[in-house]
Amino acid sequence: MPQPIYMDSHATTPIDPRVLEAMMPYLTDHFGNAASSTHLFGEYAKNAVDAARGQVADLIGCSEEEVIFTSGATESDNLAVKGAAYQYRDRGNHIITSVVEHHAVLDSCKALEESGFDVTYLPVDKYGMVHPQQVEDAITDQTVLISLIYVNGEVGTINPIAGVGEIAEKYGILFHSDATQGIGKVESEVDELKVDLMSFTAHKMYGPKGIGALYVRKKDPPIQLYPLLHGGGQENNIRSGTLNVPGIVGFGAACELCKGGMEGEARQITVLREQLYHGLSKRIDLIHLNGHPTQRLPGNLNLSFEFVESQSVLLGLKDIALSSGSACNSDSVEPSYVLRAMGIKDELALGAIRFGLGRHNTEAEVATVVERVAAQVDRLREMSPLYEMAQGGNYEVAIPANGETS
Ligand SMILES: *Cc1c(COP(=O)(O)O)cnc(C)c1O
């Protein structure tokens, strides 16, 4: 049995061995509580947290006191959206977001609607992109928060975040971005992205699970967030709870590795992604690219294959980790809400496969994936009467509402 191939890096990434090595002492000898400052055990832990906070801050170009550690991007999104909404509810009750957000933002907004907030969910263009003008047009005198995803986790489209940030600043409205899929892979600096609040997580960037951060810009007057968790007052009273020292150390190490290797890695992964795309296009006809052709995360390829359902393709490829739609929805056969929002027809949305390349993938793996996916698509199409009719010219091939035909 050959080694399984992991190509689902938008769902999670493997821990880099160098990250694990950095963490190990804090899972064993240095187990202290970072808040126990009177003894050496606590001091070791606190020093490690301080150093890691520096590494995280360095990657996103902010100061250490602007980094709030959380349990992951889900918590960071909840803290940013609900924390800002509750804190500033006397100023207004309107929030602007988009229909293609991660559920951590979408469902936080839904919850806020139940307690009297008004939410505008902006539509996206055929590439899954939101444009700054749409945001500006949606602003009212009640708007207290704009929350817009940076890089889409399904189709890899990179939103023009900086343009939205400029508008938010002009109107004096807080701007949050869920940047989980982008940090450490594409532009990651908060002043370039022009965000006030930014969520990200270690396990999407070769760090451990269960640790993330919310960036909170230091401003005058200071941004305040109503906490989700009350308790010991850690993290500037914004996020109580004993710090996850080994997780934080691993997160810091992961950030440092990304900062050092980001450009080279992006280039290398883009080469692999193009090999994958061209290889599949050569072997299989009637393929459509979902998402933006250029404004796209290096490691993302999302393709729809006509006349097959992606679920059936993936069932035959248990040893190759790919995804149909977003991971959280992979048990349901509903077309992805992101592809639907982009105006892609259900038949094509149901035939979509997401390839998520990471720093561990090789050319040999790409070649294997091309062959195995192509063989599986061939096999399924052989059983499809519709495909046969299309080959004989008796069936009009579905021209997608959008998406590129290869
Ligand atoms: C994975 C992901 C999350 C959730 O992150 P967790 O750390 O697993 O809670 C949120 N937003 C986006 C865009 C993601 O890709």
Image (cartoon, rainbow, N blue to C red):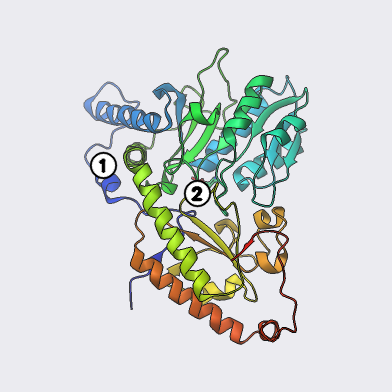
Q: Position of residue 290 (x, y in %)?
A: 61, 58
Closer to us: 30 or 117: 117
Q: Secondary structure at mark 1?
A: helix
Which residue occupies 31% across, 50% down? 16
Please give the residue where the numbered disc 1 appears in the rendered image.
22
**Where on the picture, by quarter, is residue 164?**
top right
Whether label 1 lies within 8 Å of ligand 1 gets the answer no
Q: How many marks?
A: 2
Closer to us: 84 or 169: 169
Of the residues tagged 2 and 1, which is closer to the observer? 2
Mark 1, residues whose alpha carbon is within 10 Å: few (<14), some, or many (≥20)? some
Whether label 2 lies within 8 Å of ligand 1 gets the answer no
**Where on the picture, by quarter, is residue 330?**
bottom right
Please give the residue where the numbered disc 2 appears in the rendered image.
297
Q: Position of residue 200 (x, y in %)?
A: 48, 39
Q: Position of residue 131 (x, y in %)?
A: 67, 38
Labels 2 and 1: the sequence-earlier one: 1
Q: Amino acid at mark 2?
A: Leu
Q: Is residue 32 left or right of residue 291?
A: left
Q: Is residue 358 visible?
A: no
Which residue occupies 43% across, 54% down? 270
Q: Is residue 39 left or right of residue 190?
A: left
Is residue 48 depicted above or below 14 in this figure?
Answer: above
The quadrant the N terminus occupies is bottom left
Is residue 89 depicted above or below 264 in this figure?
Answer: above
Which residue occupies 50% across, 29% down? 192
Q: Secondary structure at mark 2?
A: loop
Q: Is residue 86 visible?
A: yes
Q: Amino acid at mark 1?
A: Ala
